[in-house]
Amino acid sequence: MARRLVRKISLTGLVLVGLLLLNISPVLASTQSDIENSLICPACFAEAMSVAACQDSTAQQIKEEIRQKLAMGQTKEQIIKIYVDKYGEKILTNPPKKGFNLMAWVIPFLGIMMGGALIYLALGRWVKVPRTKKGREKTKPGVLDDYYNARVDEEYKKYL
């Protein structure tokens, strides 16, 4: 009976150790997910689909390679650099924020700011009430009204 208990305990321990070895730790799993989301599948360049979203055999192969490299102790940056060296920067889902690619990050914000400024200026001109010039004399209300009323009465009498 003691033998049976020892076997059960050792078998349970072996199973647990095996599951722990086969299972990737949560930190490695999140790192793997980050890497998969930051790389475009080489078979899906036209659709720009990430390795995580792609179901192609190439994506499955890359997922397995990433899992192996993480198990060997490589960092996220090292793994991404390997794929950038192999395929170029077009494999990245987000262009790096340096050099010419910086324009892809800056131009949309500049466009929004410039568009807002143009709308502000246009609305300001449409709503703005024109000012009178300083040198121009203002006429009193009613002076011209009497003149035009008299003219209208004269014209009206001609046709009656």
Image (cartoon, rainbow, N blue to C red):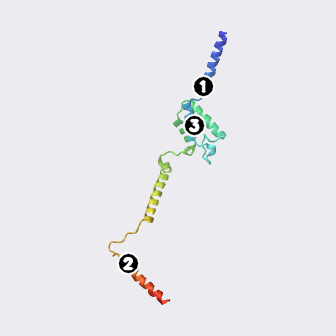
Give residue 112's position: percent from left, percent from top.
48, 54
Kindly state the secondary structure of the residue where label 1 is placed: helix
Q: What residue type is labelled 3?
A: Ser
Q: Compare marks 3 and 1 and give the one earlier in the sequence.
A: 1
Along the line of sight, which residue is nearer the eye, 81 or 36? 36
Q: Compare marks 2 and 3 and give the one earlier in the sequence.
A: 3
Q: Which amino acid does label 2 sit on?
A: Gly
Q: Compare marks 2 and 1 and give the one earlier in the sequence.
A: 1
Give residue 36's position: percent from left, percent from top.
58, 39
Identify whether 149 is placed above or below 31.
Answer: below
| Disc on res. 142 | 2
Q: How far apart are marks 3 and 1 (CA)?
A: 19 Å
Kindly state the secondary structure of the residue where label 2 is placed: loop
116 lies left or right of 61 = left
Q: Judge depth for marks 2 and 3 and give the one in front.
A: 2
Identify whether 37 is placed above or below 17.
Answer: below
Query: Which residue was labeled with disc 3?
Result: 33
| Disc on res. 158 | none
Residue depicted at 60% across the width and 25% down the height: 21
Along the line of sight, which residue is nearer the eye, 86 or 35? 35
Along the line of sight, which residue is nearer the eye, 41 or 85? 41
Q: How many marks?
A: 3
Query: Which residue was labeled with disc 1?
Result: 21
